[in-house]
């Protein structure tokens, strides 16, 4: 919500699919009783940072309209502080 209005996106557009991928990536696996397969396994203590393959697998399992590519930029200083950076590129399936 932005102020007093809602932001919406048109169904089946890249914005819609990207929004769905964001939800998948921010939902802990098993946390939704209506869809326990939605989400990512906990990446908190993953050695070397979050697992890009886990993101690809989670999206493939839950969002057939998306094709994702994940790049990780591992900066030793960021990792030492418990942070890593992942770039998730989303495309509509078949338009890659």
Image (spheres, helix red, strand yellow):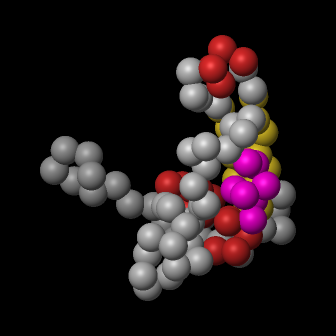
Magenta segment boundaries in residue numbering? 51-57
54 inside magenta stretch: yes
Q: Nearer the viewer, residue 45 or 84?
A: 45
Q: In the rendered image of this protein, does residue 48 appear above or below residue 59?
A: above
Horizontal arrangement in the rendering, residue 66 relative to residue 3 (left or right): right
Q: In the rendered image of this protein, does residue 74 appear above or below residue 57?
A: above
Q: Residue 95 falls in which quadrant of the image?
A: bottom right
Q: Residue at x 75, y 65 (%)?
A: 57
Residue 77 visible to the viewer: yes
Q: Nearer the viewer, residue 35 or 11?
A: 35
Q: Residue at x 64, y 74 (%)?
A: 62
Horizontal arrangement in the rendering, residue 92 relative to residue 23 (left or right): right
Q: Residue at x 26, y 46 (%)?
A: 2
Q: Residue at x 72, y 18 (%)?
A: 76
Query: Can you give x and y, in whole percent of width and height, for residue 14 in the image?
Result: 62, 59
Q: Residue furthest top?
A: 77
Query: Can you give x and y, in whole percent of width and height, for residue 86 in the image?
Result: 68, 38
């Amino acid at each position: 919500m932005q102020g007093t209005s809602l932001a919406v996106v048109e169904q089946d557009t890249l914005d819609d699919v990207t929004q769905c991928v964001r939800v998948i990536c921010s939902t802990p696996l098993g946390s939704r009783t209506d869809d326990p397969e939605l989400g990512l396994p906990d990446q908190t203590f993953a050695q070397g940072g979050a697992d890009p393959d886990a993101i690809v697998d989670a999206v493939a399992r839950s969002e057939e309209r998306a094709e994702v590519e994940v790049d990780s930029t591992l900066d030793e200083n960021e990792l030492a502080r418990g942070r890593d950076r992942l770039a998730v590129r989303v495309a509509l399936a078949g338009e890659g």
